[in-house]
Amino acid sequence: MIPGIFLVVDDEKTQRETLRTVLESWGHQVQEASSGRAAMELLEGNPIDVIMTDLRMPGMTGLDLLAAAKEARPDIDVLVMTAFGSVEGAVQAMKNGAVDFITKPIDLDQLEIVLHRTMDRKNLVRENKILKRRLAESVRGFRLLGDSQAMQAVLAKASRVASTDATVLVQGASGTGKELLAHSIHDLSHRAEGPFVAVNCAALPESLLESELFGHVKGAFTGADRDRAGRVRQAEGGTLFLDEIGDISPLVQVKLLRFLQDRQYTPVGSEKLYHANVRVITATHHNLLERISDGHFREDLFFRLNVVNLRLPTLAARREDIPQLAAHFLDKYSKRYERSARTFSSESMASLMAYSYRGNVRELENVVEQAVVMTTGEVVHSHDLPPMVTDPAVSGPSDILSAGQVNGDLPALLENLEKRIIMETLATFEGNQSSAARHLGLTESGLRYKLTKWKE
């Protein structure tokens, strides 16, 4: 039996002591109360799993205690004890939320069965809560951090697609966390126990990429001195992540299209056909629609890849996440470099919030790592940050307007800034004007008016 912490409530001392002896012999911890009011006092601040209470007690009855205990601690389990001829009271207690009842005189075999059932049920509820909390944390964090509306919109969509085998295209600027998002989708999928295999398509020339993906046989080309399994074979039963998919050559695009159509492939130099059991997630910082228009990317391949589209916002579009991200990186690198840095000064945090971050979250991480290396105390000050973050002359133009940028035309500059923010927000919400308007604090009609004006 799973051990628990019991509170035995009975106005009869002999009954309490007998139950205590039995329960402790079964490995449980036991507290006693001679009345309902005494039980409520013990319940406050004490970790009680189960209350065992007599129904008929002077003052606060067992039913009264049941109601008060459930109001104070909804997760508490209550077992009621009643005389053999008063089962109707036990039935009423069950209707009011008791988990079970025991008749007096108590049969120890029956009591053991009831307690087994109660503790098993309680443990199952506890495990379910833990699993739900882990899932909630996964949905919220996804190996990525950020409570901003823009980030949460992406993660909510990703959590819905994670349980499927649908092909996913992740888009976003460099440094926004595309591979982390792909890996998180894998973590939450039924393929989580399988491998996650990542391929940076931009890092490999056309002559090697096909072999890297599908493998080759000995003698397939100069230097192929043995058979080699490709990344597709390595990802069997798991997830294949193809990063920078927008950079692959037309020839490899054709090969990949055929693979996506039926999950079949042939290693370079072989005639043997293999079937792959893999999920495919791809990512790119390119606008693939523009590359299709330019003739650099196949439209039919785009449709195969774009079953579900997830677009990660830039860090500039979710500045409210910077303190949380910076704190995470501070903890990470303080532990790695055995430094005592624990927090940021108000001035240094203001600098972090104002910086442009062309490299997005990856650049923020690099900035914080440098600061941890430079700081000597528990607080990161402005002088610990890289000069580019604190000195506009070093960092160049900021995303935030400064007096030097106005040059006699503040209205035009403000309108350009407003237009850029709105267009970035629309991109974040995949063109959904209702969601973008809510995020910006505008009415939907007001947003449409601005978009119409800018088209004229």
Image (cartoon, helix red, strand yellow):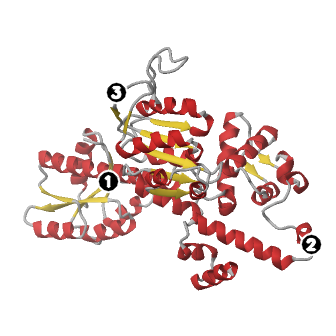
Circles 1 and 3, Cβ within 8 Å, touching? The answer is no
Amino acid found under the numbered disc labelled 1: Val
Tell me the distance, in whole angstroms, between the alpha carbons under discs 1 and 3: 51 Å
Q: Secondary structure at mark 2?
A: loop
In the image, residue 456 above or below residue 351: below
Closer to the camera, 430 or 211?
A: 211
Locate the C terminus and report the quarter of the image it occupies: bottom right
Q: Is residue 335 left or right of residue 101?
A: right
Mark 2 vs mark 1: in front: 2
Can residue 406 be seen in this snapshot?
yes
Amino acid found under the numbered disc labelled 2: Asn
Mark 2 burial class by Cα count in 10 Å: few <14, some 14-19, many 20+: few
The residue where tag 1 is placed is 125
Mark 3 burial class by Cα count in 10 Å: few <14, some 14-19, many 20+: few
The residue where tag 2 is placed is 407
Can residue 58 be seen in this snapshot?
no
Q: Earlier in the sequence, mark 2 or mark 3?
A: 3
Amino acid found under the numbered disc labelled 3: Lys
Tell me the distance, in whole angstroms, between the alpha carbons under discs 2 and 3: 68 Å
Q: Earlier in the sequence, mark 2 or mark 1?
A: 1
Residue located 35% across and 64% down the image = 74
Q: Secondary structure at mark 1?
A: helix
